[in-house]
């Protein structure tokens, strides 16, 4: 039911240091040794002189190095991004990017790694071949994603710790696709969550910090966004075991016409996509500290609720070959959020990115995702104390 990992980390920041110079330590040792000698030989001047010379020879007068004892940081940084599908070999290898996808995340790798924990949504399967593709009425317009297994290394290199596999594409190649996706992610040390009955949540540890993630969607085989009782149970369990809890959801209608959060149930092509506003609030009430939403393939608003950040949709972050990237669908926020040891929002930063049909995400000098978020935040959550500055800085209204 759960996954526990204590794998790699990108270098925690130390909150403070207790420092002792080597000469101070040696002086203390000399003092203790002298007392010991005096107890056995009382006033043996020759022994004391010999010991003093040892101390003098061991500790140079100009020594300035310090022995440092790390102290746990008072805040932690998390990065969240939206949908990722680096390329698909189905229905044709022509939908794969050049250089084996190795450069798809290169322009934002430093930003992704600048965090204690990094999250994204894996939109599709990781499978070289095989599996049974889901049925499509029109194969030419069939959106079924199968990325080569080597692409998992690109996520690992970019610094991802958690990937959600609760979405409408995680089952594109049936049980074979899901099983192999999990195995490949295990091989590169990336935790995942969102499958009903088997991998409903994941827990990782990073330098003494225990972080839990749960993922939900309205799609078959995943942990349901509609079952609030089950969702509260999972999040409550994580809240009891972990220092910080991340909840991911794949929900809401798709496209620029559905960019606002309606605070009601959303239906898209006859499918109940959930009431993401109600769900997000319920998960915070149950113990979630950060909510990362995705699914609409466009950016949606953010809000602060009970000192917890909710991102309703992080848009298309790195989606090559088969995604519409026109207009709002081609821009997205890379969200960095800082929380205290209890998971409360402290601050953050939005870095706007854009992608095109021939390259992965790059930092957007036009700041389009920031402007979109400012507009949507004001329209959808005017009561929220969240402030998004022109430079992307996130803060709380005092």
Image (tube, rainbow, N blue to C red):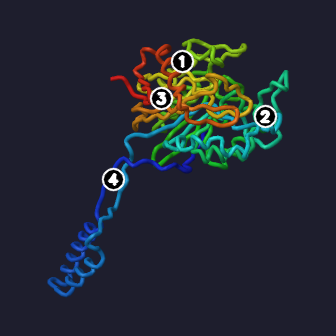
Among numbered discs 4 and 2, the one appearing first in the sequence: 4
The Cα–Cα distance between marks 4 and 2, rounded to whole angstroms, is 51 Å
The Cα–Cα distance between marks 3 and 1, rounded to whole angstroms, is 16 Å
Residue on which disc 1 sits: 277
The answer to whether residue 253 is above or below residue 31 is: above
The Cα–Cα distance between marks 2 and 3, rounded to whole angstroms, is 34 Å
Q: Quadrant location of the C terminus? A: top left
Tag 4's secondary structure? strand
CB atoms at circles 3 and 1 under 8 Å apart? no
Residue on which disc 2 sits: 173
Q: Nearer the viewer, mark 3 or mark 1?
A: 1
Per the rendering, the mark at residue 17 is 4
Residue on which disc 3 sits: 287
Q: Quadrant location of the N terminus? A: top right
Q: Nearer the viewer, mark 2 or mark 3?
A: 2
Looking at the image, which is closer to me, 314 or 94?
A: 94
Q: Residue at x 21, y 85 (%)?
A: 47
Looking at the image, which is closer to me, 258 or 40?
A: 258
CB atoms at circles 3 and 4 under 8 Å apart? no
Tag 2's secondary structure? loop
CB atoms at circles 1 and 2 under 8 Å apart? no
């Amino acid at each position: 039911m759960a996954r526990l990992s204590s794998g790699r980390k990108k270098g925690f920041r130390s909150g403070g240091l207790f420092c002792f110079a080597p000469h101070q330590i040696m002086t203390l040792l000399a003092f203790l040794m002298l007392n010991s000698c005096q107890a056995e030989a009382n006033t043996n001047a020759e022994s004391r002189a010999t010991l003093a010379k040892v101390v003098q020879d061991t500790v140079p007068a100009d020594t300035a190095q310090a022995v440092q004892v790390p102290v746990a940081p008072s805040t932690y940084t998390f990065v969240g991004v939206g949908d990722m599908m680096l390329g698909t070999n189905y229905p044709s290898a022509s939908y794969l990017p050049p250089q084996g996808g190795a450069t798809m995340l290169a322009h934002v790798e430093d930003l992704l790694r600048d965090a204690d924990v990094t999250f994204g949504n894996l939109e599709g399967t990781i499978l070289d071949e095989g599996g049974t593709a889901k049925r499509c009425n029109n194969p030419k317009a069939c959106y079924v994603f199968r990325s080569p297994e080597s692409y998992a290394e690109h996520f690992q290199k970019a610094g991802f710790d958690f990937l959600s596999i609760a979405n409408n594409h995680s089952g594109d190649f049936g049980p074979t696709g899901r099983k192999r996706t999990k195995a490949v992610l295990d091989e590169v040390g990336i935790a995942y969550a969102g499958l009903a009955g088997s991998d409903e949540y994941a827990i990782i540890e990073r330098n003494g910090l225990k972080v839990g993630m749960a993922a939900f969607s309205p799609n078959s085989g995943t942990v349901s966004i509609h079952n609030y009782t089950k969702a509260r149970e999972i999040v409550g369990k994580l809240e009891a075991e972990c220092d910080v809890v991340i909840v991911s959801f794949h929900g809401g209608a798709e496209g620029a016409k559905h960019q606002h959060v309606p605070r009601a149930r959303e239906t898209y092509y006859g499918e109940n996509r959930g009431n993401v506003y109600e769900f997000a609030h319920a998960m915070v009430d149950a113990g979630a500290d950060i909510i990362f939403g995705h699914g609409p393939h466009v950016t949606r608003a953010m809000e602060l609720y009970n000192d917890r950040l909710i991102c309703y949709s992080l848009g298309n972050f790195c989606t090559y070959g088969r995604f519409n990237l026109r207009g709002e669908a081609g821009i997205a926020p890379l969200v960095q959020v800082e929380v205290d040891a209890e998971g409360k929002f402290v601050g953050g930063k939005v870095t706007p990115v854009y992608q095109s049909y021939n390259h992965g995400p790059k930092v957007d000098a036009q700041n389009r995702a920031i402007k979109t978020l400012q507009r949507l935040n004001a329209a959808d959550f005017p009561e929220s104390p969240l402030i998004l500055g022109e430079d992307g800085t996130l803060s709380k209204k005092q």
